[in-house]
Image: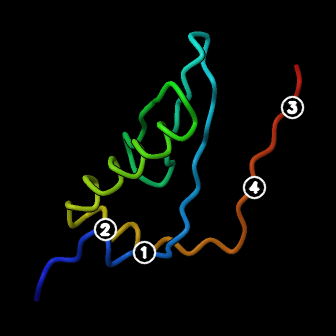
């Protein structure tokens, strides 16, 4: 059987955390994959970069397994002020 690539997962929605750091870079992380993060000077650049990182991560069989089993019913991010 042929290995799946990132194109085989088109249409799959993944959660991303986006944060603007102290140097005004956008830091993006996909929390379902360990070590899946990148940055960019603009939001568009950082989102393009995270797509590339995810494509590379999906070359590994274990990560494709994680993605296949990822079936959230709901996802939300909340913040609090301390």
Residue 49 figure quarter:
top left
Alpha carbon separation for disc pair 1 and 4: 22 Å
2 in relation to 51, above or below: below
Which label lies toward us, 3 or 1? 1
SS state under label 3: loop
Residue receiving disc 4: 76
**Quadrant that contains the C terminus:** top right
Q: Residues within 10 Å of mark 2 (few under 14, many from 20)?
A: some
Alpha carbon separation for disc pair 3 and 4: 13 Å
Residue receiving disc 2: 6
Which label lies toward us, 1 or 4? 1
80 in relation to 66, above or below: above
Q: Are marks 2 and 3 in contact (CB under 8 Å)?
A: no
Q: Which mark is residue 80?
A: 3
Q: Residue at x 31, y 68 (%)?
A: 6
Residue receiving disc 1: 10
SS state under label 1: loop
- Give the mark nearer the N terminus: 1 vs 4: 1
Query: In the figure, is residue 49 to the left or right of 6?
Result: right
- Give the mark nearer the N terminus: 2 vs 3: 2
Decide which of 78, 19 is in the foreground and name it.
19
Alpha carbon separation for disc pair 3 and 1: 34 Å
Q: Residues within 10 Å of mark 3 (few under 14, many from 20)?
A: few
């Amino acid at each position: 059987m042929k290995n799946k690539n990132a194109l085989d997962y088109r249409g799959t929605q993944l959660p991303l955390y986006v944060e603007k750091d102290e140097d005004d870079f956008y830091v993006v992380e996909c929390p379902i994959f360990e070590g899946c993060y990148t940055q960019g000077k603009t939001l568009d650049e950082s989102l393009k970069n995270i797509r590339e990182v995810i494509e590379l991560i999906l070359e590994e069989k274990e990560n494709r397994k994680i993605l296949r089993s990822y079936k959230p019913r709901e996802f939300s991010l909340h913040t609090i002020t301390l």
